Image (cartoon, helix red, strand yellow):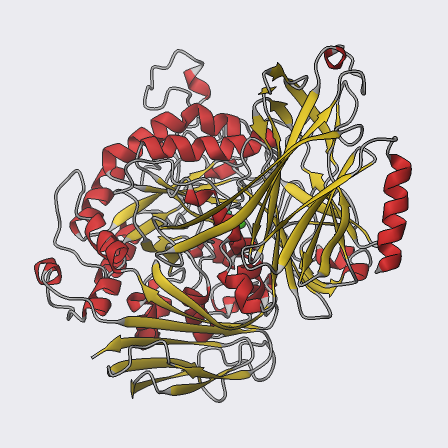
């Protein structure tokens, strides 16, 4: 270790010109962590220790800029400001009702004095360059960001509009840690995780791409994405990520395997720039979470705490959503998004609905007279079937994909004008289906697949959101499949990150909640914009049999650190060969799928399978019906990335009520509906209406979920979080003794047992999970 530090010190000193040397430290509130800023011969660095031991060794900071000298040398320390902060805040939706935000802060102001550096516009000859670095140290990690004031001490900053060629921030690891990583990529995050030593990343690079998403745009054989979860040989859990990424490119990491040094690798824009800045401005937070236990990493709120408080005054329209979808039919191959097979290519009318359009009308594809292909999933009768099922089982909403014209050639064609997001296919009666759904207490969820043409989506967005408002849709699933338009942009460059944010902000104006797929992985922005109700932004259930066992035990450590995931669980028929001849076996049991509703946090949770796949297993389906999706308290009982997670959660009653009542405020009338999760928490029988619900008192309720990888496991779960002296009824959904989700001779994914038991705070439950299995328990006070 000492050797690495010394070599680094020598290297950095060689790189730096003679200049000022200084160091300033800040400690975490519990005193265990210490972050030190070091100016070494004018070059900025930092390091991080826990209990006196290095976690991040001496690491470089700064930037390379276009048209002027870098922001990495010739600095002098101007000022150090220290402060602390301690608050408890309450997320609109979340894993817990009260979040503690307690940190010590150190703001470093650095200056490159006049004459110390050069710039092509000569601005540095008359004005100093000012860069600040803000450190926030929590008990569970460090956040730091770079800030660029417009003026400092009454003098204008030489930095006004400036472009980054490279961010130089390093994260020097102290050894060959174990890491759970996906390859760095400018366009997709849809990969299985690889578990390896840092030194093995290079040799596993090809393999890490197997069964992944598309398109790939790699930049290095040792490039990885964040959130990156690591474990040291001493058992420390280190996680590198970023928080509040706004108007800035996404940060990946590039490893130098010889020194275990990661360097920030930003996703460039089409011109190759890695951030176009205008002072006053700042970068996102670079975060290093450090925990003694894996369960503490799941408990950490570091990323959320580093985001700004809620930007919306009125959040009354935001509510949790449990939904079904006309979706798995298309993913599995049973039906299609497109309505007809008549057209090899589609040209849409830029003036939808106007058949007299002056713009070469005759060239537009005429769906009204097209021959239906007979496989279109989003047809009136099928949608009604799903509405009936979802309503009967107390869901809040139904997603329908393939409702709008254009799906005949939406994929891989790089079409700019690919959808209008307004015009339904002839067999999808949008007004009538919404009316039918609302009468049954179901909202329809809109679908906007942009096909990665962000320019086209922005063109139609206002009209598309207005249409949603007109018919009472309050949530949209958007998608960004394929090559980004404008061409040569990647999915995570600054301009495209700005597009995703624009979609959220505009949606909020229309009281619309957004669930974006293939958009950039979240960085905690849902604290500020709680209408970001979900994201996919990782390999989700749509990858079917390509998902490795254990994948879902890693995601809560990585992808979910930034925000909830629309993983779309609930597949009860995992043998896809029963749906289409080319289908293969998915690697999970039914109980594993049940466990996901608790181990994965998402206030938007899907029951993704077909109604006919739930019908034979309605006793197990009951757990999906009963489970809540927004929480008062979460307890992470057991966890190890790649192996298992066991979580217990208590529902948040206020948002549960909101979800139940949310469907009541529709343009076409108020309905007497109550979601099934509310029924469960209030112990209200199926036959009773919303009026009884309003006068009922919620019961103390908990849900426990467990998931495992390919290995069977058993856990003893102490129910000491229940209220002493109270008696509870528990319903335990467990893998049967002969269950297995691992394809092979023993494949038996649908075998489970359901046991009812009286329990108290003194009870310990012994629960076993089959290979690729899991369990779920609902517990309600008598
Ligand atoms: C990819 C999304 O992740 C998936 O959920 C969706 O069905 C397809 N794109 C089509 O939009
Ligand atoms: Ca996807």
Tell me the quadrant of the picture where the N terminus can be found: bottom right
Residue nearer the viewer, 706 or 116: 116
Rendered image quadrant of residue 71: top right
Spot occupied by residue 100 in the image (x, y as percentages of width and height): 43, 54
Rendered image quadrant of residue 233: bottom right
Spot occupied by residue 257 in the image (x, y as percentages of width and height): 83, 54
Residue appearing at x 13%, y 50% in the figure: 671
> Horizontal placement of 640 versus 166: left or right?
left
> Horizontal placement of 268 versus 84: left or right?
right
Residue nearer the viewer, 179 or 96: 96
> Horizontal placement of 514 versus 518: left or right?
left
Spot occupied by residue 9 in the image (x, y as percentages of width and height): 86, 46
Above or below: residue 218 compared with residue 154: below
Residue nearer the viewer, 47 or 213: 47
Spot occupied by residue 526 in the image (x, y as percentages of width and height): 43, 44
Above or below: residue 215 compared with residue 602: above
Tell me the quadrant of the picture where the C terminus can be found: bottom left
């Amino acid at each position: 270790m000492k050797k690495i530090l010394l070599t680094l010190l020598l290297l950095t000193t060689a790189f730096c010109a003679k200049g000022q040397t200084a160091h300033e430290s800040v400690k975490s509130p519990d005193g265990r962590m210490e972050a030190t800023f070091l100016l070494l011969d004018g070059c900025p660095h930092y390091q991080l220790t826990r209990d006196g031991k290095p976690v991040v060794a001496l690491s470089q900071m700064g930037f390379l800029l276009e048209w002027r000298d870098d922001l990495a040398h010739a600095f002098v320390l101007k000022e150090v400001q220290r402060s602390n902060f301690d608050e408890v805040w309450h997320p609109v939706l979340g894993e817990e009702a009260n979040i503690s935000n307690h940190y010590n802060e150190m703001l470093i102001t650095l200056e490159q004095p006049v004459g110390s550096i050069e710039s092509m516009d000569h601005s540095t000859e008359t004005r100093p360059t000012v860069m600040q670095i803000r450190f926030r140290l929590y008990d569970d990690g460090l956040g730091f960001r770079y800030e660029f004031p417009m003026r400092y001490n009454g003098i204008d900053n030489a930095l006004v509009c400036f472009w980054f060629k490279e961010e130089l921030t390093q994260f020097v690891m102290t050894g060959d840690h174990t890491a759970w990583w996906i390859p760095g990529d400018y366009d997709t995050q849809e990969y299985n995780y690889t578990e390896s030593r840092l030194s093995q990343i290079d040799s596993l690079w090809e393999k890490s791409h197997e069964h992944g998403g598309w398109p790939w745009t790699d930049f290095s054989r040792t490039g990885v994405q964040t959130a990156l979860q690591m474990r040291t040989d001493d058992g420390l859990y280190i996680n590198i990520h970023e928080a509040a990424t706004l108007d800035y490119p996404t940060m990946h990491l590039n490893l130098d395997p010889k020194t275990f040094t990661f360097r920030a690798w930003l996703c460039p824009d089409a011109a190759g720039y890695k951030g176009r800045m205008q002072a006053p401005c700042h970068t996102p937070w670079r975060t290093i979470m450090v925990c003694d236990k894996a369960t503490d990493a799941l408990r950490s709120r570091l990323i959320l705490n580093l985001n700004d408080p809620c930007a919306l005054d009125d959040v009354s329209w935001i509510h949790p959503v449990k939904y079904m979808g006309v979706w798995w039919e298309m993913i599995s191959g049973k039906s299609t998004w497109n309505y007809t097979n008549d057209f090899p290519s589609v040209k849409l009318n830029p003036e939808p609905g106007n058949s007299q359009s002056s713009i070469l009308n005759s060239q537009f594809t005429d769906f009204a007279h097209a021959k239906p292909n007979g496989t279109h999933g989003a047809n009136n009768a099928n949608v009604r079937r799903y509405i009936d099922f979802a309503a009967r089982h107390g869901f809040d909403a139904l997603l329908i994909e393939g409702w709008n014209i254009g799906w005949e050639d939406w994929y891989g064609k790089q079409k700019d004008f690919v959808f209008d997001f307004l015009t339904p296919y002839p067999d999808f009666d949008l007004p009538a289906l919404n009316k039918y759904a609302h009468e049954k207490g179901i909202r329809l969820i809109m679908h906007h697949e942009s096909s990665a043409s962000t320019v086209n989506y922005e063109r139609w967005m206002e009209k598309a959101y207005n249409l949603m408002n007109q018919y009472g849709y309050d949530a949209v699933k958007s998608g960004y499949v394929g090559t980004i338009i404008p061409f040569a942009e990647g999915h995570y460059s600054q301009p495209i990150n700005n597009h995703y944010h624009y979609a959220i902000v505009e949606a909020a104006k229309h009281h619309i909640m957004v669930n974006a797929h293939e958009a950039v992985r979240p960085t905690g922005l849902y604290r500020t914009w709680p209408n970001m109700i979900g994201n996919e932004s990782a390999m989700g259930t749509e990858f079917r049999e390509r998902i490795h066992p254990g994948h879902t035990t890693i995601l809560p450590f990585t992808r979910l650190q930034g925000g909830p995931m629309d993983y779309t669980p609930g597949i009860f028929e995992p043998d896809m060969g029963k749906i289409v001849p080319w289908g293969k076996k998915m690697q999970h049991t039914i109980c594993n799928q049940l466990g996901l509703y608790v181990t994965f946090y998402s206030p938007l949770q899907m029951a993704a399978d077909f109604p006919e796949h739930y019908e034979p297993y309605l006793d197990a389906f009951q757990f999906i019906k009963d489970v809540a999706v927004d929480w008062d308290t979460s307890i992470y009982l057991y966890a190890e990335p790649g192996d298992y997670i066991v979580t217990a959660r208590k529902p948040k009653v206020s948002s549960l009520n909101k979800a139940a009542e949310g469907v009541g405020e529709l343009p076409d009338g108020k309905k007497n509906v109550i979601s099934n999760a509310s029924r469960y928490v209030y112990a209200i029988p199926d036959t009773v209406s919303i009026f009884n619900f309003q006068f009922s008192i919620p019961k103390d309720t908990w849900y426990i979920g467990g998931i495992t990888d390919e290995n069977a496991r058993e856990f003893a779960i102490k129910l000491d979080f229940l209220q002493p002296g109270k008696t509870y009824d528990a319903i335990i959904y467990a893998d049967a003794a002969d269950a297995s989700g691992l394809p092979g001779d023993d494949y038996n994914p649908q075998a489970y047992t359901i046991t009812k038991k009286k329990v108290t705070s003194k009870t310990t439950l012994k629960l076993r999970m089959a290979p690729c299995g899991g369990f779920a328990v609902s517990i309600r006070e008598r």
